[in-house]
Amino acid sequence: MSNQQADPEVGTEGPPTEFLDGATVALGGPRGMAVTRTLPNKRRRMVGAWCFLDAYGPDDLDGTPGMRVGPHPHLGLQTVSWLVAGEILHRDSLGSLQEIRPGQLNLMTAGRGIAHSEETPADHSGVLQGVQLWVALPNSDRDVPPAFAHHADLPVITEGGLSATVLMGELAGAVSAARCYSPLVGAEITLAAGADARLPIRADFEYAVLALDGAATVDGVTVKPGPLLYLGDQRTALRLQAGSATRLMLLGGEPFAERLVMWWNFVARDHDEIVQARSQWQDGGLFGEVRGYDGPAMPAPAMPITRLVPRGRLR
Ligand code: MN
């Protein structure tokens, strides 16, 4: 076995890779669904504008309530919901009501403020697996009006046993219709057993790969479900190989230059903006009401005793 060694045909050129270990978090409180959070990470807070990555499942929903994330606010970001298996029902304060299934994108642009809930619908397939991502909005667009879009028809590229669905941004000439506010890409890549493919990428983007199912080698480095493989920038192609059927999430983007304060469900620029957003949620203004969710809205946690400090993409 030589999985941890560089592939002799690829060589060791290119930036060094790092594994970013995930933290296990109970979504919606201690009795909530377990997710593995790899962004933000202690060592690296962002990949491009991607600032949050939770992966969950596959979970057998038999005897469980499934996903139950009650109404909560967002600010200054986009939420990207993507499923590998199962169903989620999205509701928001714009009045959107949208179920998503595997292969479809739910994209919510919080902009200046929105509230939403996510739940396993009553009529479901009994299994749930997916990822929840956030994209930080650049300063110039962080106050855009809130919006929700469902994309069921996303571009797919195929090459040598590889199939990639482009959720956000552009990959190898395929462009998603989903609205982005900074140069980035998010794609689900499936590799057939025995796949050996070369995927062109941009040298000015930094990239990371998360394995959702199976195992693959990415430029000679083996990636399995769990940690996020950070690949850096300056690569012009990725060599992707898999012995058995494998599913990956590829994230990339221009390194995000602005400093952010991320707290709870908000992305802002300083402590006082977070205090204001928190009180606006507690007061019931700005974010609006989510109708139809059978349960309470989430209260904001207490502010920390010390002032929140804006941080860059590295820690
Ligand atoms: Mn949310």
Image (tube, rainbow, N blue to C red):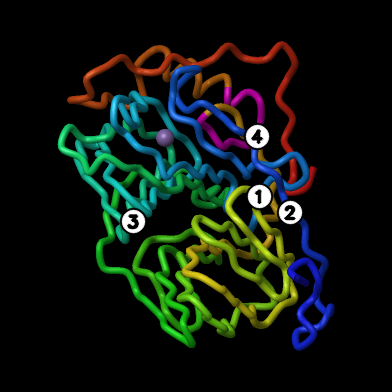
Q: Give the x, y percent position of residue 244.
A: 51, 70
22 above or below 253?
above
Q: CA distance from mark 2 to mark 4?
A: 24 Å
Residue at disc 2, secondary structure? strand
257 sits to left or right of 158: right
Q: Amino acid at mark 2?
A: Phe
Residue range corresponding to the magenta coloring? 265-274
Q: Quadrant of ligand 1?
A: top left
Residue tagged by mark 1? 227
Marks 2/1 in contact by CB < 8 Å: the verdict is yes
Q: Residue 268 location in percent, x, y?
A: 58, 36
Question: Does the magenta portion include 267?
Answer: yes
Q: Which mark is residue 105?
A: 3
What percent of the width, then of the height, locates residue 45?
Answer: 69, 45
Is 205 on the left-hand or right-hand side of 151? right
**First of labels 2, 4 by sequence position:** 2
Q: Is residue 13 magenta?
A: no
Q: Earlier in the sequence, mark 3 or mark 2?
A: 2
Q: Residue at x 31, y 56 (%)?
A: 102
Q: Residue at x 27, y 54 (%)?
A: 150
Q: Nearer the viewer, residue 206 or 67?
A: 67
Which is nearer the N-term, disc 3 or disc 4? Answer: 3
